[in-house]
Amino acid sequence: MTQLLDKPLELKAPPSPAQRTAHRRALLEWIAIHSFGVAAALFFTLPFVFVFLTSLMSDSQALSRDLIPHTWEWGNYAEVFDTPGFLTWWKNTLVYAGLGTVLTVVSSIPVAYALAKFRFRGRNLALMLVISMMMLPPQVIVIPMYLFWAKQLDLSGTLWPLIIPMAFGDAFSIFLLRQFLTTIPDEYVDAARVDGCGDLRTLLRVVLPMAKPGVAAVALFQFFYAWNDYFGPQIYASENPGAWTLSYGLESFKGAHHTDWNLTMAATVLVMAPVILVFFFAQKAFVEGVTLTGVKG
Amino acid sequence: MSTLTLRAKHRRSALRTLAFLSPWLIGFSVFFAYPLISTVYFSFMRYDGFKPPAWVGTKNWAYVVEHYPLFWPALRNTLWLVVVMVTLRVAFGLGVGLLITRIKTATGVFRTLFYLPYLAPPVAATMAFAFLLNPGTGPVDSLLDRAGLPTPGWFNDPTWSKPALTLLALWGIGDLMVIFMAALLDVPKEQYEAAELDGASPWQRFRYVTLPNISPIVMFAVVTGVIQTMQYYTQPLIAGKVASGVIQGAGTQFEPGYPDRSTLTLPQLVYNLGFQRFDYGSACVVALVLFALSMAFTALLMRRRGGLIQAGER
């Protein structure tokens, strides 16, 4: 009845002056908000645009005040790839980020699971220690760590001092995964146990399939962390260009081509592009991860 | 159940917990506890990596606080960044978050565009900004010049280098935007409706409905922002290096904090003392100052919001 009554009545009623001003105000508000939106979008995207355009200029034009290339020098990218070392930096970065991510995920999952689902004495203390580790600037412990890796294990000049620790759990990944796992109801775990599943099987067969988004977010964060890391490679790899990563090499690239902004910007684009591509493929997991880092509650 | 089986069960469950925690227990001991204790130990030693460490008492501490010329500038810069950069980042993040929740057309496109800069690797983003803000010929100064505005020296001018870094930090606001967006969408709709019925203006609605609801998140953003500022390393370092045009590895030693120590931060001092001057003892002193500051704010974070622990538990 109400449905029948509501619609025709609304259609028939002529718009009152009050309704019309409300309408106009809504329209003005829409315009205002979207103008702000476009202005903000320009602020966020123009740097990318300028960098990309400059990467296609000739070296003399890149030093001028021009914003648009006269000739489109796609060869700049080929020249960057031909720079001695550039492909090695790519390879090293992939090894550091790829291997590091796998090790981190594998070693962090059981720890996060125990912190989320097991009851034991000292659980809160352990969690607080994980958070403290997460907040620890890497520079605080770098002196003893460097002496340990370089003087005792003779591993400086390689990326192993950065990769090996990832096999022993990463505080941020543990924390984030633990946050995710606590959202999975205990009943699933209990039911699996009643069915005679061992702890490891419960984790692998029951919990992990439900935790895929959390695992994906952790993997992404860790991959990006390694990809972006500058301090780590600076400490351990700087002495050996054969072990440099992209983030570290990019800065030296600028040093070697210090007036060639076009080449430097082409190299910059090549360091940014993979991260942005990965993001487009995994956008949802990533944004979910950012929200999980401590917002709810 | 007999006590024997109960005890066996207990032991099994303790073993199980230990087994699951074992990767982290090793990681915690070898990569956290040991180096931390060792840092304290070295802060009382003279050690250059070659001659055996020698006990010097509090000499390193006195040196860093009284004579090391970079210590106080770095602390002052950190204070500047905490006051200006963190405040602006939280305000801007909240603003962009508010904006994105009110955009009704092509929301997804706007959100992605706003978020992308956060993903740009710090070295690459800083290089990009060093180019964009290149004094005189960079795109930003070109545009300012065409508009008849003054053209600052940005990363090459001690008064403009920190504002330039702040600009870079505001560009990468994506993390805060997403966090504020989630918080804003969580504010109960009924409260807005009630406020509107009472005739509250948009500002009043923001002040009395939005802010009280999201204040824990604002607090979270401020404290994590402060902690991140303590660790601020890559961006100021790269900005200084690129602006000063130093060629890396060519034997030239980069004077940290270019221009005029204005981009120095505490983590850079650890590098400078430890890996350029080979004064590991003094480097450990700065490391401990950094540690104390970070942990103080982390404690604040955990106390103010048991939320960090309870997060996701509802």
Image (spheres, helix red, strand yellow):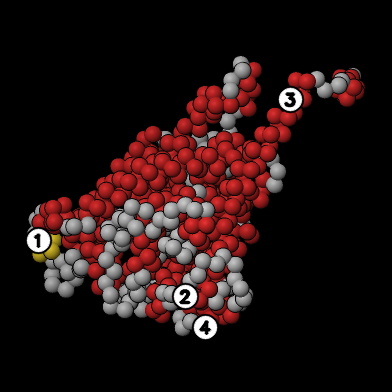
Tags 4 and 2 both on a single chain: yes
Question: CA–CA distance between discs 1 and 4?
Answer: 51 Å
> Residue B230: horizontal and vertical position, in percent?
33, 50
Q: Nearer the viewer, mark 2 or mark 1?
A: 2
Relative depth, front residue between B273 and A48: A48
Give the residue pinned by disc 2. A260
Residue ID at (49%, 53%)? B148
Q: Horizontal and vertical percent for residue A19?
A: 77, 23
Tell me the distance, in whole angstroms, between the alpha carbons under discs 2 and 3: 57 Å
Under circle 2, the secondary element is loop
Q: Chain of mark 3?
A: A
Do badges 1 and 4 share one subunit? no
Chain to which mark 2 belongs? A
Task: Determine whether, in the image, residue A14 is placed left or right of residue B277.
Answer: right
| Type of the residue with mark 2 | Asp
Q: Is residue A176 visible?
A: no
**A276, B166: nearer the viewer:** B166
Confirm or deny contact between disc 2 and disc 1 (CB under 8 A). no
> For mark 1, does the 10 Å Cα neighbourhood hold few (<14), some (14 to 19), or many (20 or more) residues?
some
In the picture of the structure, the residue carrying the numbered disc 4 is A82
Give the residue at mark 3. A21
Q: Residue at x 63, y 47 (%)?
A: A38
